[in-house]
């Protein structure tokens, strides 16, 4: 019979794979941002929240805080660099100076808070249980922030009846990620993993439900938007043509008139 530890390890590895795909899922979005040279209406909040969450869990999984949690460290350690890259791209391609300043300020506050937390926990809490409790509570807060951060995007979806700015794969793998780590937490019960990933299941399900509800309407709205842009381009082209003809008559007579002079 398979032991609980073996099952937990297998589920943890699956969770690592799903989490890695989740953290890479916004790549397509950032390729579009890079091509357009603008972040448009995309929100930096999910990426800042995810960065905070990953830093907290990487700290939680360290042997000096919560032993036997290597799989928690590996995925969250990798994710820190991935999410930091996304935030830097937001800083580069945001045309709004106020938004850029806010993102930079939040980023510095997160880094400063985590450095201070790590120092205080290691220096002042002298048992694994105390360290796990303190960092675990911060992790729950971080997970709630990460899973709740798309609420602003969900509000935009409901208001515009469009999922254009709610990336599907980010929502899908957020749901799968919650399922994997919720299962991992239940095999050898860990309250600090169970609560946030249970909430993640609810938020992930809500996002997928919104996507299913507004997907068809989004295609119609995007087609109409593209048609308006095309129409505007044709109008501008039509206005430029008379100007070119006018310049020809202003600079001299047409060829037929010159021949008859």
Image (cartoon, grey):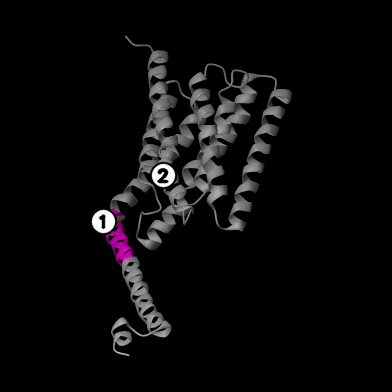
- Quarter holding the N terminus is top left
Q: Is residue 64 magenta?
A: no
Q: Is residue 48 visible?
A: no
The residue positioned 35% from the left and 76% from the top of the image is 241
Q: Quadrant of residue 213?
A: bottom left
- Quarter holding the C terminus is bottom left
Q: Position of residue 226 (x, y in %)?
A: 32, 62
Read off the residue under disc 2.
Answer: 203
Q: Tag on residue 216? A: 1
The local secondary structure at tag 2 comes to helix
Q: Say whether marks 2 and 1 touch (CB < 8 Å).
A: no
Q: Position of residue 162 (x, y in %)?
A: 35, 58
The residue positioned 33% from the left and 83% from the top of the image is 254
Q: Is most of the magenta stretch helix, strand or loop? A: helix
The residue positioned 26% from the left and 56% from the top of the image is 216
Viewed as shown, does residue 220 lie left or right of 42? Answer: left
Q: Quadrant of residue 118?
A: top right
| 122 up-or-down from 110: above or below | above
Q: Residue furthest top?
A: 1
| 195 up-or-down from 256: above or below | above
Could you say which is closer to the camera, residue 20 or residue 225? 225
Q: Which residues are magenta?
A: 215-227
Could you say which is closer to the camera, residue 54 or residue 249? 249
Q: How many other residues sit within 10 Å of disc 1, few (<14), some (14-19) or many (≥20)? A: few
Viewed as shown, does residue 39 lie left or right of 138? Answer: left
């Amino acid at each position: 019979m398979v032991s609980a530890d073996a099952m937990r390890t297998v589920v943890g590895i699956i969770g690592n794979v799903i989490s890695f795909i989740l953290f890479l899922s916004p790549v397509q979005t950032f390729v579009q941002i890079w091509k357009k040279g603008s972040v448009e209406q995309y929100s930096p909040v999910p990426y800042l929240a995810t960065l905070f969450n990953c830093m907290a869990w990487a700290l939680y999984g360290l042997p000096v805080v919560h032993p036997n949690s290597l799989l928690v460290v590996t995925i969250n350690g990798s994710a820190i660099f991935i999410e930091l890259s996304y935030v830097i791209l937001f800083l580069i391609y945001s045309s709004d100076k106020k938004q850029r300043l806010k993102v930079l300020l939040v980023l510095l506050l997160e880094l400063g808070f985590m450095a201070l937390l790590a120092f205080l926990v290691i220096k002042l809490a002298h048992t694994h249980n105390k360290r796990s409790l303190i960092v675990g509570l911060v992790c729950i807060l971080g997970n709630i922030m990460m899973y709740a951060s798309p609420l602003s995007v969900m509000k935009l979806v409901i208001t515009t009846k469009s999922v254009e700015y709610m990336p599907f794969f980010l929502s899908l793998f957020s749901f799968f990620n919650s399922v994997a780590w919720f299962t991992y937490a239940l095999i050898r019960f860990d309250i600090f993993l169970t609560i946030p990933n249970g909430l993640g299941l609810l938020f992930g399900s809500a996002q997928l439900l919104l996507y299913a509800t507004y997907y068809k309407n989004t295609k119609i709205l995007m087609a109409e938007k593209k048609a308006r842009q095309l129409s505007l381009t044709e109008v501008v082209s039509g206005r430029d043509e008379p100007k070119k003809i006018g310049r020809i008559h202003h600079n001299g007579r047409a060829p037929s008139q010159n021949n008859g002079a």
